[in-house]
Amino acid sequence: MSPGGSSGAVPVLRAQGIEKRYPGTDGGPLEILKGVDLELSAGSLTAVTGSSGSGKSTLVTEILLPLV
């Protein structure tokens, strides 16, 4: 089974190589997301899980904001 729970179905959303950086306290970049790939198929149920501050909301924002 591929990411997103699909079993060979055509993806309804595919995002590849998602990256997000913020300025770090030392002036250098702070990598929040690096090379994240996501593929969701119709009818699939996908959960984004992780500890506090791990980038879950940032990931969802990076995917959905361009669609608005």
Image: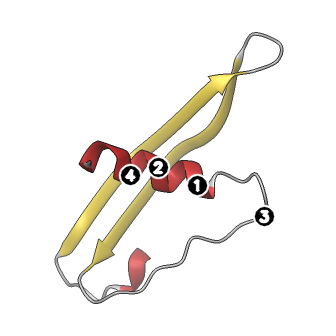
The kind of secondary structure element at disc 4 is helix
Q: Is residue 54 visible?
A: yes
Task: Tell me if label 1 and label 2 are in contact, CB under 8 Å.
Answer: yes
Q: Determine the residue positioned at 61% across, 58% down.
A: 56
- What residue is disc 1 on? 57
How far apart marks 4 and 2 lie (CA) works out to: 5 Å
Q: Residues within 10 Å of mark 2 (few under 14, many from 20)?
A: few
Frontmost residue, 15 versus 62? 62
First in sequence, mark 3 or 2: give its number. 3
**Residue 51 got which mark?**
3
- The three-letter amino acid code for the residue at tag 4 is Ile
Task: Tell me if label 3 and label 2 are in contact, CB under 8 Å.
Answer: no
Looking at the rendering, which quadrant does residue 14 occupy?
Answer: bottom left
Task: Tell me if label 4 and label 2 are in contact, CB under 8 Å.
Answer: yes
- What residue is disc 4 on? 63
First in sequence, mark 3 or 1: give its number. 3
How far apart marks 4 and 1 lie (CA) works out to: 10 Å
First in sequence, mark 4 or 1: give its number. 1
- What residue is disc 2 on? 61
Q: Is residue 16 visible?
A: no
Query: Residue 18 at x, y = what percent?
Result: 44, 44
- The three-letter amino acid code for the residue at tag 2 is Thr
Query: Residue 66 at x, y = what percent?
Result: 29, 43
How far apart marks 3 and 1 lie (CA) works out to: 11 Å
How far apart marks 1 and 2 lie (CA) works out to: 6 Å
How far apart marks 3 and 2 lie (CA) works out to: 17 Å
- The three-letter amino acid code for the residue at tag 1 is Ser
